[in-house]
Image (cartoon, helix red, strand yellow):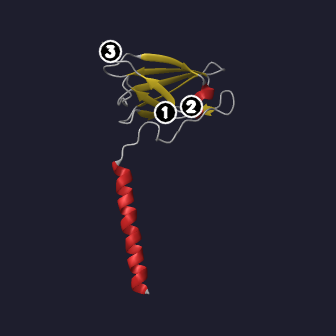
Amino acid sequence: MRKLLLVTLLTIAAFGVAQAQDQAGSTPDNNDIPNMGRAPGQPDGVGRLDLRVLDEEGNPVKGVRADLKSTRMNGFLCESWNWTDARGVAVLPPLHMGRLQLTLKAKGFENMKLDIAASDLNQPVRVTMVRKN
């Protein structure tokens, strides 16, 4: 009985390692990555931007500098920034949300400025960058 239990545990462990290797070797696309964005629950509340950046061919863009400026009702300005990773994803630090403007800059691409509604942050913000001519 003990040998049967040991063989069963070893078999389960072997299959678990093989499954983990299969998952680690696969590259998730931009849509398979869990959303880390959060819209504020109230005016001037705290939110977080989850950004997904692709090029015109649908490939992730690494190294995009994303700057988010939030002009709040009381006149204060909050800012956060981050760079996209190899998957084209950047999750910016949380900040108080007011009127939002997102600026994107990357080598070889046109700079972009976008106005974003704070209420849209419960889903990733998806942007397609255009290459410079």
SS for tag 2? strand
Tell me: 20 left or right of 93: left
Residue 92: image tag: 1
Determine the residue positioned at 50% across, 42% down: 34
Outermost residue toward the top?
133
Q: Which amino acid lies under the numbered mark 3 shown in the image of this protein? A: Lys
Label 2 close to label 1 by CB (< 8 Å):
yes
SS for tag 1? loop
Nearer the N terminus, badge 1 or badge 3? 1
* x and y percentages locating residue 23 in the rendered image: 39, 52
Q: Which amino acid lies under the numbered mark 1 shown in the image of this protein? A: Leu
Q: Which residue is mark 3?
A: 132
* x and y percentages locating residue 46 in the rendered image: 61, 33
Q: Residues within 10 Å of mark 2 (few under 14, many from 20)?
A: some
Q: Nearer the viewer, residue 8 or 104?
A: 8
- Distance between the alpha carbons at the discs numbered 2 and 1: 9 Å
Q: Which residue is mark 2?
A: 95
Determine the residue positioned at 36% across, 47% down: 26
